[in-house]
Amino acid sequence: MLTHPRLAELLEKVDWEFAQEAHLGGCLYCGAKLHRGDYERKPRDGPWSWDKRYSFCCSQEGCRRRRTPPSVRFLGRKVYTGAVVVLLSAMTDGISGKALSRLSEVLGTTLYRRTLRRWQRWWQEVVLGSAFWKTARGWFMPPVVEERFVSALWQRFGADSPEGLVRLLRFLSPLSIP
Ligand SMILES: [Zn+2]
């Protein structure tokens, strides 16, 4: 699914919409117009060639603050793309060595088990304790099983299809803003 052309297309479309919305909204502090000021990104993985994250700078002298819209491609400061982090984190029951090397091949980068463990800690320690999740958890009935957080969300959002995975990444996109 990671190599599905539809997935890349949908993710790019959503990020572009987020960017337009932020641009039109203007500076969050003074309301002035925003200039484009994208961040350079070097995702380490994937069949994608995304090297920029949309971001804007206030045009007003003396303010010049930054406004970075949420993103479904880049999740937080991770060097891996959101789709990869979510997909691999959802496979909580363990990934065989064979599957891991096949994934590394598809992504063109070596994936280590310690990276996957670091992501699990991030979900459990950072995301579950975040203000975002404290609000969002109430939207699910029955409640999401937090011990199996990402795989539970994966099922709720039907993330086996590109559309479902994009829905899930859109839901998680508040986590993409520093
Ligand atoms: Zn401003």
Image: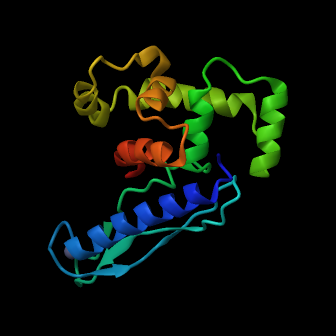
Instruction: Give the residue at x 75% y 34%.
Output: 112
Spot occupied by residue 167 in the image (x, y as percentages of width and height) = 41, 45
- Asked where in the image residue 22 lies, by quadrant, the reply is bottom left
Spot occupied by residue 76 in the image (x, y as percentages of width and height) = 47, 48
Would residue 115 be found to the left or right of residue 58 on screen? right
Spot occupied by residue 77 in the image (x, y as percentages of width and height) = 51, 50
Q: Vertically, is 59 above or below 102? A: below
Q: In which quarter of the image is ligand 1?
A: bottom left
Instruction: Give the residue at x 64% y 54%.
Output: 4
Q: Which of 161 and 154 is in front in this view?
A: 161
Q: Can residue 84 be seen in this view?
A: yes
Residue located farthest toward the left when viewing the structure as drawn? 30
- Asked where in the image residue 134 lies, by quadrant, the reply is top left
Instruction: Tally the numbered discs.
Output: 0
Would residue 96 be found to the left or right of residue 14 on screen? right
Q: Which of 46 and 26 is in front in this view?
A: 46
Coloration of the structure image = rainbow
Spot occupied by residue 163 in the image (x, y as percentages of width and height) = 47, 48
Q: Vertically, is 167 above or below 146? A: below
Would residue 100 be found to the left or right of residue 90 on screen? right
Q: Can residue 175 be seen in this view?
A: no
Instruction: Give the residue at x 24% y 84%.
Output: 61
Instruction: Give the residue at x 60% y 68%.
Output: 51
Q: Vertically, is 135 above or below 147? A: below
